[in-house]
Amino acid sequence: MKSKRLTDRELAIMLILWNSDKPMTASEIVNKAGDMTINIVQGALPRLLNKGYVCVADIIHINKVYGRTYKPAITQSEYMLMEFQSIFPESSRSANSLLAAFIKSSANQKETLDEIEDMIKDYRKGLTE
């Protein structure tokens, strides 16, 4: 799929988009970010488009001009998996170790295990259907 890594600024923009319930304009991203200028965001969005991480959701009328709205082309989970696999190519054994480390470091291990068990049950149901 995508193989190009994200810069810190690109990742910050992606986090904003992943946490939004609707596509966003560059100005809206700047307002959410707080520490980025419009020039930084407008410079990063074409790179994210070229890398395949975002797509143009719509072209909308804003005041007297038209602007693009952007949405993620991949989910945050897909990105995390790609990053993990790029660091640990032999991911089957590493994934188990990573999961064990997350559980051990969890503040509430019982709740974490319950959530994992629920996800496993859901995935098993999907496999049998």
Image (cartoon, helix red, strand yellow):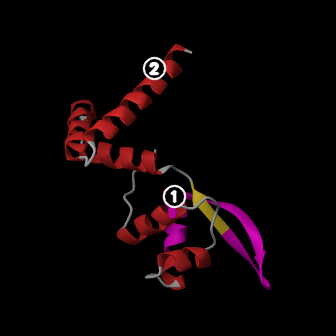
Residue at the (71%, 75%) spot, across then down = 67
Which residue, given by chain and number where applicable, does mark 2 sit on?
A: 124
Q: Residue at x 32, y 39 (%)?
A: 112
Give yes or no for residue 62 being in the magenta stretch.
yes
Q: Position of residue 90 (x, y in %)?
A: 23, 34
Residue 75 on image: x %, y %: 50, 49
Residue 18: x and y, percent? 51, 58
Depth check, front residue: 4 or 115? 115
Query: Contact, CB < 8 Å: mark 1 with mark 2?
Result: no
The image quadrant that residue 68 belongs to is bottom right
Q: What stretch is highlighted in magenta?
A: 42-68
Per the image, the residue denoted by label 1 is 18
Looking at numbered disc 1 in the image, what kind of residue is underneath it?
A: Trp
Q: What element carries label 2?
A: helix
Residue sitting nearer the eye, 86 or 94: 94
Q: Does the magenta stretch include residue 67?
A: yes
Mark 1 to mark 2 CA distance (whole Å):
27 Å
Residue 42 shows in this picture: no
Amino acid type shown at disc 2: Arg
Among the 4 quarters of the image, the one containing residue 22: bottom right
* First along the sequence among labels 1 and 2: 1
Left or right for 107, reference 22: left
